[in-house]
Amino acid sequence: MAAYVLFTGLVAISNAVSSPWSSLLINGVPIPDPNAQAPTGNLSMPLRQAAEKAGIFIGAALNYYDLQQDSEYAKVGGEQYNLMTAENGCKWSATEPQQNQFDFTQCDYIYKFAKTNAMIFRGHNLCWGVYNPNWLTSGNFSPDQLKQILQNHINTVMKHYPDNNAYSWDVVNEAVQDSPSPGNIYKTNVWYPAIPNYVDL
């Protein structure tokens, strides 16, 4: 769905400048042509090649440790997908393990893996109710302190990964309850209800 939205936004650009789709790039990777015909017959081609022929992205969430320790895992990931996101390497526990002490080792590794393999990098995530470090979940911070912590984290990550390094980020991840009701929409977590409008900050 995200890829489709991206494509519809670029159609007007392509028409306006009369440029072929192959000349439009993200991180140096050509954008698949959404008007291309889906491939038929050859099932032995990599998934990413079939996806590009069909004008779509196909991706996976890849794990930092598995990429380092399992060569076959890394080989299949690089060969089969044209879009990737970090399974856990760009989340809070990895990127800010201690308050205001940032570590981009895992996220950088995955971003560089994507770039090396001509893949689009999708950032995941900037705010979530789970997979947060203990200092955050057990810190007993006031709402104002939580706002400052959240804004500082997002600003720091975005400065480390400027716009041209990722085509999108999950800003607030899985905020809505599985069975929401009027007046009871968001999941209870470190951010909510302490910051009632945290999704809109």
Image (cartoon, rainbow, N blue to C red):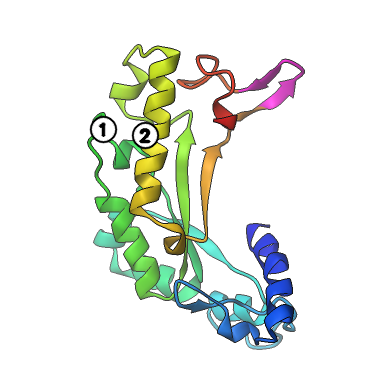
Q: Name the residue under label 2.
A: 152
Q: Name the residue under label 1.
A: 100
User: In the rendering, at what x and y percent does residue 95 appear?
Assistant: 31, 42
* Picture coordinates of residue 196, whole percent (x, y): 58, 18
Q: In the rendered structure, does residue 157 fall within the stretch colored magenta? A: no
Residue range (magenta): 178-186
Which comes before the other along the chain, label 1 or label 2?
1
**Picture residue at 68% right of the left edge, 57% below the top:** 1
Q: Is residue 3 above or below residue 157?
A: below
Position of the C terminus, as image quadrant, is top right
Give the residue type that dot 1 points to: Asn
Q: Where is residue 63 in the image (x, y as percent from the top left)?
A: 37, 53
Residue under the image location 25 percent in, 41 percent down: 102
Q: Residue 179: within the magenta?
A: yes
Give the total of numbered labels.
Answer: 2
Element under label 1? loop
Q: What residue type is labelled 2?
A: Asn
- Under circle 2, the secondary element is helix
- At 41% across and 72% down in the image, what residue appears? 78
Residue 131 can be seen in this image = no
